[in-house]
Image (cartoon, rainbow, N blue to C red):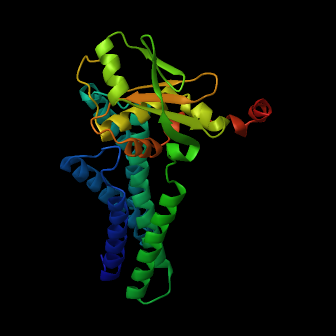
Amino acid sequence: MSEGHFLRIAAAVAVGTFARLIMLRSDYRQYPSYPHAYVVHLGLGFIAASLGALAVPAIVTRNFMAASILALAGQQFREVRDMERRSLEKLEDTELVPRGTAYIEGIARVFEARNYLAMAAALATSLVSYALPLPRGMAVAAGAACGLFTAAVIRGVFGRRVVGDIAVVREGRIRFDGPLLSVDGIVLANIGLAEARSIIETQGIGVVVEPKNDNARATLANVGQRQAIVHDAASIMGVRVDVSERDFTPLMRLDITTGRAGMVIVPMERDIEALLEVVRRVPVIETSVRKPLATRAGRIAAD
């Protein structure tokens, strides 16, 4: 391999790996949260960047066998989704408040897509550095800039929406009608023990999520979306519950008349504004998205 090929490939691999690195962080979803997960995902990002970086020089040098092998190798990144899904499903039994299958599938899809983003950034870097009729150093620098720009554009276009984008999140009033627990009139559960009712009234927080339109109402009606909200709230704020203690398990139920969703949680940290911000930042699960207003029948019904 000539020095020119090596510099172009190295720059493309570096840009692609960096694009993967800036998207790999522990955030409000608390995943990944341990060093080995970082190593696994950075390793996969490096491999993806290498595949994107090697595609152009393989074609330039007429090594079409290498190009076909790279194409086959790229298909294997579909295994990443299965790997993430299996790992998170095995951890579900250890969660006091499970993520739910919809949330797990959403996380798995995101990690698969991010490897393709790393590949695309590296491919753009490599393509521009070979295509521009400039001195080698300038061509490599221009390619790196193009690769970073590509990563930024793709990340912006495919950025995930959050609950705060589709709904109004506010505090709700907790009330008991006998043993029936409700938040702003949305009945959540039957709490039999008087002691438990007292704790929920004094230490619990009610949250109401009001959809902004019919699309949001249909999305919030999805059980997986509501389970994701409950899980993130419990993960960030903590929850006063242990195994087999059902009375204090966070709940979220739907008002079938208005489409509002009500939640009650007894958090370890009783900070109402922090809890509302957590709920607003919960991602909209891809598999829960519904768009009835995109259909003619849905628009007629809305009118």
Quarter holding residue 96: top left
Locate the C terminus and report the quarter of the image it occupies: top right
- The x and y percentages for residue 79 are 36, 41
Q: Position of residue 13 (x, y in %)?
A: 33, 67
Of 184 and 69, which appears nearest the observer? 184
x and y percentages locating residue 182 in the rendered image = 48, 21
Residue at point 56% right, 28% down?
221
Residue 242 at x, y percent in the picture: 23, 23
Residue in the picture at 47% in, 69% down: 124
At 40% from the left and 66% from the top, the residue drawn is 122
Q: 17 above or below 37?
A: below
Image side of residue 80 versus residue 283, left or right: left
The furthest residue to the bottom: 135
Q: Is residue 142 visible?
A: yes
Locate the N terminus and report the quarter of the image it occupies: bottom left
Q: Is residue 143 left or right of residue 40?
A: right
Report the side of 77 relative to 40 (left or right). right
* Residue depicted at x 35% and y 72%: 9
Residue 247 in view = no
Using the image, determine if residue 291 lies above or below residue 121.
Answer: above
* Placement of 69 over or under 230, stated as above or below: below
- Marker count (numbered): 0
For the residue pair 233 and 284, the one nearer the viewer reads as 233
- Residue 51 vs 200, above or below: the answer is below
